[in-house]
Every structure is written in C-alpha cells, then in structure tokens.
Amino acid sequence: MKNGGWVRWRHWTERGLVAFGQMPIRDVGRELQKFEAEAIKVLKETGADHVLYGVKEYDSDGDLDTVRFYLEPMSEQEFEDRVVKNSAGMTVYAVHKR
C-alpha cells in the first residue's frame, strides 16, 4: 500500500474546488456513503437523471491515487458526455433516476 494508507481527496462544487486534503484509505467508504445520501436528496429535489457524487482515480500501478467528491446533478446527455466518456481507469459513484 502506497502513501502509508493515506489518499488525497478533493471536493468540487459548481464553483470549483472548495476543499482538499488527505484521509486514511479506510475512511473513503464512509465519506462516499455520506455523499451518496446527499446525492439521493439532490436527485429527488432537482429531478435530474443522474447525480455524480464521487470518483476514485488510480495510478499506473492500479493503486488508489485520488478521491474526488461532488454533488452534481446531470441530464442523461451530460452524464454520457462528461462522465461515461471520460472515466477509463476510474471508479465512478452516482445515483440514477432509473
């Protein structure tokens, strides 16, 4: 395990990067669960097709490098263009209308 069990993280909003730091890898799942709960609320409130709430990026060795957190509602087309087409080598976390 690289970086002594720690991973870089970034929190993005529609205004850009709002927070960043490092966290123990063991805490990533718990943080993603918090963002998922909020993403479900955003999905219901906005009527969006999808709400992106997290992305895990991996380095060339396949080790977790960075976790990005979002709460970004998207239409079907936005999700396809911005997420699906650009997610090679990543794990994407989103909630979906259907």
Image (cartoon, rainbow, N blue to C red):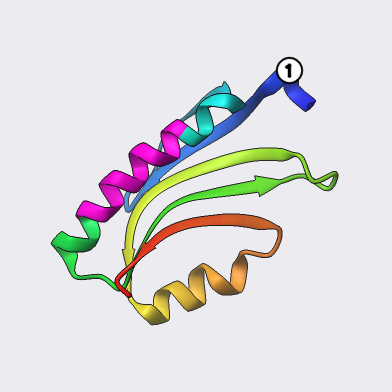
Q: Where is residue 74 in the image (x, y as percent from the top left)?
A: 34, 69
Q: Where is residue 78 in the image (x, y as percent from the top left)?
A: 41, 75
Instruction: Look at the picture and state if 5 lies above or below 52.
Output: above
Residue pushed farthest bottom? 77
SS under mark 1: helix
Callout 1 amino acid = Gly
Q: Locate residue 2 relative to residue 72 in the image: left or right.
A: right
Can residue 19 be seen by looking at this rendering?
A: no
Residue sitting nearer the eye, 11 or 76: 76
Can residue 55 be seen by looking at this rendering?
A: yes
In which quarter of the view is residue 63 placed? top right
Instruction: Look at the picture and state if 23 lies above or below 44.
Output: above
In which quarter of the view is residue 3 placed? top right
Q: Position of residue 23 (x, y in %)?
A: 55, 23
Q: Residue at x 50, y 77 (%)?
A: 81
Q: Which residue is drawn at 49% across and 37% down?
A: 10
| Tally of marks | 1
Residue pushed farthest right? 61
Q: Locate residue 37 relative to residue 86 in the image: left or right.
A: left
- Tell whether position 40 is magenta: yes
In which quarter of the view is residue 44 placed? bottom left
Q: Magenta residues?
A: 30-41
Disc 1 crowd, CA 10 A, few/some/many (<14, 14-19, 20+): few
Q: Locate residue 64 relative to residue 44 in the image: left or right.
A: right
Q: Residue at x 64, y 56 (%)?
A: 90
Q: Name the residue under label 1.
A: 4
Residue sitting nearer the eye, 40 or 61: 40
- Tell whether position 26 is magenta: no
Q: Which residue is drawn at 79% across and 26% down?
A: 1
Magenta span dominant secondary structure = helix
